[in-house]
Image (spheres, grey):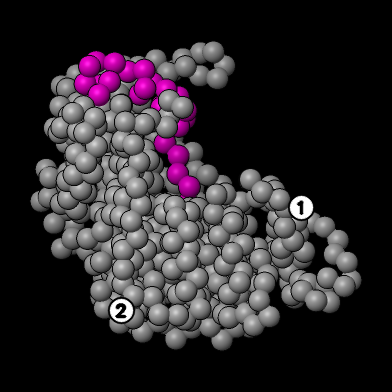
Amino acid sequence: MKTLLMAGLALIAAPALALAQSGPRPGEVEIEFTPGNGDPVTAYQGHFEVPEYRADPNTRMIELGYVRFPATTNNPGSPIIYLSGGPGGTGTGTARGPRFPLFMDMRQHADVYAFDQRGTGLSDNDIPVCVSSVADTVAQAVTDAEWAVSRQRAAVECAAFWADQGIDLRGYTTMESVHDLSDLRRHLGADRISLWGISYGSHLALAALNTIDAELDRVIIASAEGLDQTVKLPSRTAAYFQRLQDAINAQPAVAAAYPDVVGLMHRVHDRLDEAPVLLDIPQADGSTKAFMLQRRDVQALAGGALADPTNVGLVLALYSELDRGGYVIMTALIQRFMEIRETIDFRAMPLAMDRASGITEERLALFNAQLPQSPIGAFLNAPMPQLLPVLTELDLGNNFRTQLSGETPVLLLTGTLDGRTYIEGQAEAVQGLSNVTQIMIHNAGHNLFMLSPDIQSVMHAFMQDEAVADSDIWLDAPDFLANPFAQ
């Protein structure tokens, strides 16, 4: 197995006294963990082995890694395992980002583990990105159906590519990750573990609650994605835009400029459907690349940006400019956030995880019937559901997407202006669990942990087994005329 090293993590020698008091546990090494904005801290990097695909007795073993931040209390509780979103994010990467202070604060309860799920970060096991031979026709106008077929062809080709590399894609599902958590608990010698996750991390936590409930102590999830919610319902997207319009209407200057956000979006989309626009996108080497701007490109960009209300000003400015026939903002966004490639590529873990979680036939029929209600259309979670016709061998089936049950205490943090995992879906996601406390955080979006000390106080009270009543936290709405991209 490869040595587990990562940018920002440097091995250091530990004084004997430190080792005697709180040094590395078996299989760990002491490291200096450097966050993106903060002072380095002493932490411990470890790993353990699991089967890649447990249903195959001849499967290879893969290595999963984590970084442990030791507890600051003399009486620590169950280990806290951080589950990042995506799928495809990393626990160690999250810990280096803006949530680093919260990782440090959570140590007052127990050891905190920045865990890299299989196929990511310290646990990537050198799985290569697949660069398919399927052309990504970014300079040509293609229909949504043609776009979907090209992704399907690329996904099938990539599955074969990874198989040739000795990688069993069937191992990269949420259920395999649930069993990884159970193996991690045994590796740590703990009776139970606590989980702390967001977005896809909540999806994994909910699957764990439904499968290894007896091994779990407490669970904190934010921006919950249920087991049959990999694909979001268009009717709930429509309801989100009504909440957003209500919030906009509370700011007179914004309401005057944007009295009908959905109408503005549809107007832009209809124009692009009638006449896609060929843009020249500047490249770092001074050249330009052609990009045919179509409706789905703007839908996908808006769907991603609107996860948090701090990006509303950017989206409004973008649509306003497109409505006037301008493309400066759009060109800058493509230049900054998109790499224009000649062919389609995929990462194994996020592709397989989403395709495996899938969708029930009943929900897919509802999704298709509701499509006209959503200004984002079918591109909030692309390339799902577009990939459903292929890689069917990965699908976990309706038994995975079944009703939840379990008695583990759960704290659910929900932002009312979350444009990614909607409030209606979050309430649905935890139905069947008997011990859930939901906190509504008004004017918060998808990434909410660091928005207010009140949110963190609720988390600490929950971890200390103090009574936390279902309640609301009120935050000021951002200025919806502010455009963070222009700052």
Confirm whether the magenta stretch covers residue 337. yes
Residue 353: assigned label: none
Q: Amino acid at mark 2?
A: Leu
Residue 290: quarter of image = top left
Image-based side of 468 in relation to 293, left or right: right
Circle 2: element type: loop
Mark 1 is surrounded, within 10 Å at the Cα level, by few (under 14), some (14 to 19) or many (20 or more) other residues, namely few
Which range of residues does the magenta coloring cover? 320-349
Q: Between residues 477 and 65, which one lies in front from this camera angle?
A: 477
- Please say if 376 is above or below 405: above
Q: Between residues 154 and 67, which one lies in front from this camera angle?
A: 67
Which residue is disc 2 drawn over? Answer: 433
Image-based side of 287 in relation to 443, left or right: right
- For the point 36% across and 31% down, which residue is it? 482
- Please say if 309 is above or below 115: above
- Please say if 348 is above or below 285: below
- Mark 2–mark 1 Cα distance, whole angstroms, equals 42 Å
Image spot of residue 272 (x, y percent): 20, 24
- Mark sitting earlier along the chain (2/1): 1
Image spot of residue 88 (x, y percent): 48, 53
Q: Amino acid at mark 1?
A: Ala
Which residue is disc 1 drawn over? Answer: 10
Confirm whether the magenta stretch covers residue 14. no
State the count of labels: 2
Circle 1: element type: strand
The answer, for residue 308, to whether it is visible in the render is: yes
Residue 21: quarter of image = bottom right
Image spot of residue 378 (x, y percent): 23, 44
- For the point 71% across and 63% down, which residue is it? 43
Residue reaching furthest to the right: 16
Q: Between residues 132 and 206, which one lies in front from this camera angle?
A: 206
- Please say if 358 is above or below 444: below
